Amino acid sequence: MPRFLLPPHAPTVLATATGDLVAVRRVYCVGRNYGAHAREMGGDPAREPPFFFSKPADAVTTAARIPFPPATADLHHEVELVAVVGRGGVDIPAAHALEHVFGYTVGIDLTRRDLQELARKAGRPWDMAKGFDHSAPCGVVRPATEIGHPAAGAIALEVNGEGRQSGDLGAMIWPVADVIAQLSALVALEAGDLIFTGTPAGVGPVRRGDRLLARIEGVGRLEVVVG
Ligand code: MN
């Protein structure tokens, strides 16, 4: 029996309200899925096919306080609805896509915006702008059997009690079912995959010591202090 010369890492886990755990496999994110945010990023909110990027699974954190990340002078918050895949598949039709969702949580796609801008200008990958340590704070997972599949409702983020982001899930250019259909045409999805579904307008800077409060109607809330 071969042995591990280096010990395998324990999976990153999210918890439900009852304390049951979900092991995270992969983390995919949709870029520009709300028109107003696409415009604030200098894009065209036309309904082009969504584009995806990813973060390492261990970028996900449920800690109440995370360190301020290195190598940035322009850390940004992006509140997002996160779908938790419960049943894998490839080429999943949109009409059946929600059957593959176990549940949902509130996530924040933390972004080193300065590094992202440099990467965009140079045509380079976004990994170091998006996939750094602690870059994916997530809340409690709410099973779809409990809350259904939220298609509308307020999605908002406050910094130190001041409103910054405010939108509605109904304003997604590509709703969750379409996102799953498109993503599963690119990669095989498996149980435990997380899909960050994009952020509404109002992204902005996070400074050391800031308290972020993210809320999604019907899903829950997530509070995290940075630094
Ligand atoms: Mn995002």
Image (tube, grey):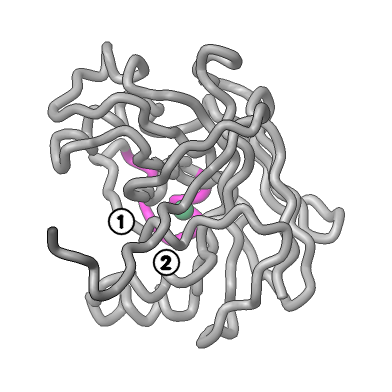
Instruction: Tell me where residue 121 appears, x and y as whole percent.
Output: 31, 78
Relative vertical location of residue 131 with respect to residue 174 in this rendering, above or below: below
Crowd class of label 1 (few under 14; some 14 to 19; many from 20; radius 10 Å): some
Horizontal side of 160 relative to 153 (left or right) equals: right
Horizontal side of 46 relative to 154 (left or right) equals: left
**Mark number displayed over residue 53:** 1
In the image, which residues are magenta? 36-46
- Front-most of 157 and 88? 88
The residue located at (23%, 40%) in the rendering is: 49
Q: Is residue 41 magenta?
A: yes
Instruction: Tell me where residue 170 appears, x and y as whole percent.
Output: 53, 25
Mark 2 — residue?
130
- Front-most of 38 and 184? 184
Say if mark 1 contacts mark 2, CB within 8 Å. yes
Horizontal side of 12 relative to 223 (left or right) equals: left
> As shown in the figure, which amino acid type bears the numbered disc 2?
Lys
Confirm or reject: label 2 Cβ below 8 Å from ligand 1. Answer: yes
> As shown in the figure, which amino acid type bears the numbered disc 1?
Phe
Crowd class of label 2 (few under 14; some 14 to 19; many from 20; radius 10 Å): many
**Which element type, helix, strand or loop, lies under badge 1?**
strand
Q: Is residue 3 magenta?
A: no
The residue located at (52%, 47%) in the rendering is: 199
Quadrant showing the C terminus: bottom right
Quadrant showing the N terminus: bottom left
